[in-house]
Amino acid sequence: HTDRWNRIENGYMWFEGVPFPTAGFTPEVLREARESFAFKDEDVLLLTYPKSGKEAGHYWGLEKSLHGGPS
């Protein structure tokens, strides 16, 4: 589906106006997360986009520990 809110462009999937990397994300997964997750007033949201190097290694290590995968 390629409309204003859901399209792949320059290696990114745009979902509701926000770019996501194409690896690991689908519109269905993002839609389900948006509909089922509720923020509370005391929640803190941290956003980062590791590109390479040490930070990317931490990201992939966290991703592996949360979602499983080969050790």
Image (cartoon, rainbow, N blue to C red):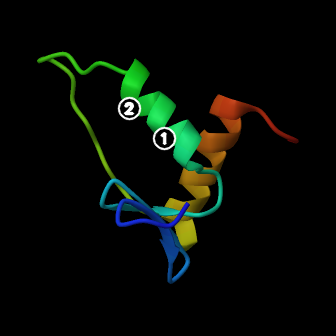
Name the residue: 25% across, 36% down.
Answer: 45
- Name the one closer to the observer, 34 or 41: 34
Name the residue: 59% across, 49% down.
Answer: 26
Q: In this view, does 54 lie to the left or right of 64?
A: left
Picture coordinates of residue 56 (x, y %)? 55, 62
Picture coordinates of residue 32 (x, y %)? 49, 29
Instruction: Let me know if residue 45 appears in the view.
Output: yes
Name the residue: 11% across, 18% down.
Answer: 41
- The amino acid marked with disc number 1 is Leu
The quadrant of the image that shows the C terminus is: top right
Q: In this view, does 69 lie to the left or right of 65?
A: right
Picture coordinates of residue 12 (x, y %)? 50, 71
Q: Which type of secondary structure does the marked residue at label 1 adopt?
A: helix
In the image, residue 45 sits, relative to residue 57, either above or below, namely above
- The amino acid marked with disc number 2 is Arg
Q: Is residue 43 left or right of residue 22?
A: left
Picture coordinates of residue 28 (x, y %)? 57, 40
Task: Check if mark 1's residue and mark 2's residue have beta carbons within 8 Å.
Answer: yes
- Name the one closer to the observer, 51 or 6: 6
In the image, residue 68 sits, relative to residue 40, either above or below, namely below
Q: Residue furthest left?
A: 41
Q: Which type of secondary structure does the marked residue at label 2 adopt?
A: helix
Residue with the mark numbered 1: 30
- Name the one closer to the observer, 4 or 44: 4
The quadrant of the image that shows the N terminus is: bottom right
The quadrant holding residue 4 is: bottom left
Residue with the mark numbered 2: 34
Crowdedness near tag 1: few (<14), some (14–19) or many (≥20) residues, C-alpha within 10 Å: some
